[in-house]
Amino acid sequence: MKTVFFNTLLSLALFFSIQTNGQTLTPLPANQATQNGTQQRTQGIPEFCGTDSIHDEKMKSDADYKKRHEEMLESIGMAASGQNRLSNGVLQVPVVVHVMHKGEALGTGTNISDNDVKLGLKYLNNYWRSISNTYGDGEGVDMKIEFVLAIQDPNGNMTNGIDRVDLSSDEAYVNNGVNRSGSSGISDTELKAYSVWDPYSYYNVWIVDEIDNTNCYTGTSYIAGYAYYASAHGQSFDGSVVLICTYLQESSSTWAHEMGHALNLPHTFNGDDPDTNTCGDDGIADTPEHIRTSQITPSIYWECDTTVSNNCDLAFNQVINPETGFARNSGTHQDHMFNYMDYSGCSSEFTAGQRVEAINALTAGRGSRKSYFEGAALEPLAAAVIDFDSPKFICLGNETTFTDKSANTPNSFTNNGYDNISFAWTFDNGVDTPITSTDQNPSITFSNSGTYDVTLEITNLQGTSSLTKPNSFIISSSSFLTYCEVTSINSSGNYGTGVTRVSFNNLSNITSTSNVSPVVRDFRCSKNTQINVDSSYDLTVEYDAINEYSQSATVWIDWNNNGTFDSDEKVLDDNVDSRNPGSYSATVSVTPPTDVVTGIPLTMRVISVTRESGNSCGDGLIKRADDYGVLVNATLNTKTVNTSQLKLFPNPVQDELTITLQNNVPLSAYEIYDISGKKVMTSTLNPSNRIQVSGLSKGLYFIKVKAAKSELISRFMKK
């Protein structure tokens, strides 16, 4: 676990400062920041990991724990010299997450939503399974271990693996959190006494707001979490304690680091002493001896391409990934500073030797965690109760992931699968051959535009269930416009300030306070929503502010799609004055204007900036822009027709659509609309009841029919 220290601001640049309007903004040096949006200072800190301190306590006070840990140390050398390739598939560890909240409504404050809990687990698995196109995508190995929320509780009941504990009546916890190294808050023992599931069958995780009265946003230092080695397996204190703010940060590898300790991975610099230049070593052959990266001077914490020699192990020569044959073997600090078990700003990998040791911690004899695989925590009790997530519109040609959210179905948010459980997805636009997948969470690239129905069928030993969501999403061939440039005086670095979450209708995205270059982050094809022209929707922006500097969050939606953000298109404008650090939230109700452009994806821009009002373009201090997609649907104010009154055939149709009305009433007029609500065809008289639609593009359409005194609406598919 990483102990984190910060002053007012952070930067990637060493001893870099900025002069603005007579005030100097001075970020900390690079070795006081991490890649994770969590802020660290390492100079003069005798201990950097909470796991080490609790482990040392147990080694002194618990003889059985000490004996099992010593047996583990003996096993490391044997494990590291064993087979690096795995023959028995992926090990799936059942997890329960205890949300230790302060009495807030579900989904607010410390009582985070079910979806956020699942996201935290997904982020963990991204690191451990080395998932492509995520923060876990490095040169290291897939650990072949993943963590899965339990679907059966200790009493044999169905569960989602989330246990909520209201601690609002515990004044010490509410005010100070968990006491690890300070004198305030409740003890680790008291915390876990509130709720713990059978530690032989479940890996327990407690997420908390504060440790020692601090978290990511308060105080001058904070512990982000801690865990016990496998020596604690089966004990009531076993498990991880993680700050909520760390748990929710996708770019934070803190929990991945802690789970390394839980599966017997020491720090790669184990036993080092930077003050005396004593080298450390974890006993695993494919990691070099070294001094922790965070204590090397001058700092190379963020210099992932450093050429500084690692004098502890100049001759290091190991393949770290036998599947790809990858090896650095540079004799520099690059050989260790990418490893999750070091302290570095470049963490992105585990090695094959670490994989063997972690698997050994789960499958070997005394001191291992093999009892996780002997229980029923991941066994379905009934047929699945199906639900799934998909974007509301998708950019043509972009790969899109669909997420299974079904109850009574284990989910690690990877696609390794589970024994005796199968998944069958169907994506059908009514024109092309349906696309299918047997992955639990498939990633699909669609080659044709249109509106798609989505069906998911799940079969387990208890039965088969299925769910279809008609018109689930739109594949849009429309291109987003290019907008004005946004720049920042300091376009990289983590200053601990800025937007942390955006929610609008069913769009929800957590972002880091780390600034990026270029300054604009384009989420339009991956994070978007559909809204209706005649409805209102809540827009919420959460952001952090720091000492001495005001902070603003501003949102525009380009309703007329003209490539500029006009003054009347500003939908949210919020700010906090100087000397009021902390986390803030602003919510407004948004209704599209009557002249909004419908049926074309629009751009919503979220700006955060320090010490000034937010402008949609131009330069600013610690300025960041996040762009999202919004598709506005026009509505047809007619009720859907009863098929006994109006029939369309053939449907799907190629050229000519025939309409049959009840009692053979002649058609007097019709209007045809595309899926966005845009009128594409019209006629004031058509007594033949036949309509030529050959000129329409492929896709879903609505037809509004007028006959006698009736006005009816139905839909058809053009192929």
Image (cartoon, rainbow, N blue to C red):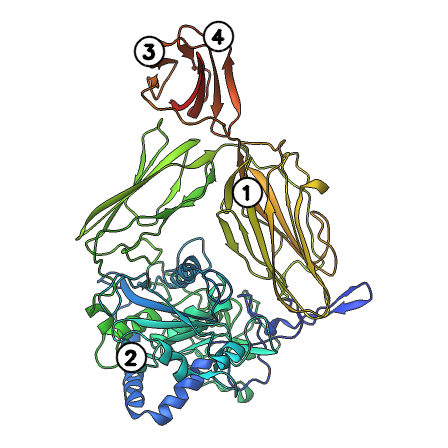
Q: Amino acid at mark 1?
A: Gly
Viewer-proximal residue, 407 or 363? 407
Name the residue beneath numbered marker 1: 629
Whether 229 is drawn above or below 650: the answer is below
Q: Helix, strand, or loop for circle 3?
A: helix
Whether 545 is drawn above or below 6: the answer is above
Q: Position of residue 310 (x, y in %)?
A: 51, 76
Distance CA(mark 2)–CA(mark 1): 47 Å
Distance CA(mark 3)–CA(mark 1): 46 Å
Q: Earlier in the sequence, mark 1 or mark 4?
A: 1
Name the residue beneath numbered marker 3: 663
Viewer-proximal residue, 435 or 604? 604
Name the residue beneath numbered marker 4: 685
Which residue reaches farthest left? 461
Q: Earlier in the sequence, mark 4 or mark 2?
A: 2
Q: Which residue sits at x=32%, y=17%?
A: 650
Q: Which one is closest to the eye, mark 2 or mark 3?
A: 3
Q: Earlier in the sequence, mark 2 or mark 3?
A: 2
Mark 4 touches mark 2? (CB < 8 Å): no
Q: Amino acid at mark 3?
A: Asn
Q: Which one is closest to the eye, mark 1 or mark 4?
A: 4
Of the 4 image quadrants, the one containing the C terminus is top left
Q: Helix, strand, or loop for circle 1?
A: strand
Badge 2: residue crowd in 10 Å (few <14, some 14–19, many ≥20): many
Mark sitting on residue 233: 2
Q: Position of residue 506 (x, y in %)?
A: 48, 47
Q: Amino acid at mark 4?
A: Leu
Mark 2 touches mark 3? (CB < 8 Å): no
Q: Earlier in the sequence, mark 2 or mark 1?
A: 2
Q: Along the horizontal axis of the image, is 716 left or right of 223?
A: left
Q: Earlier in the sequence, mark 4 or mark 3?
A: 3
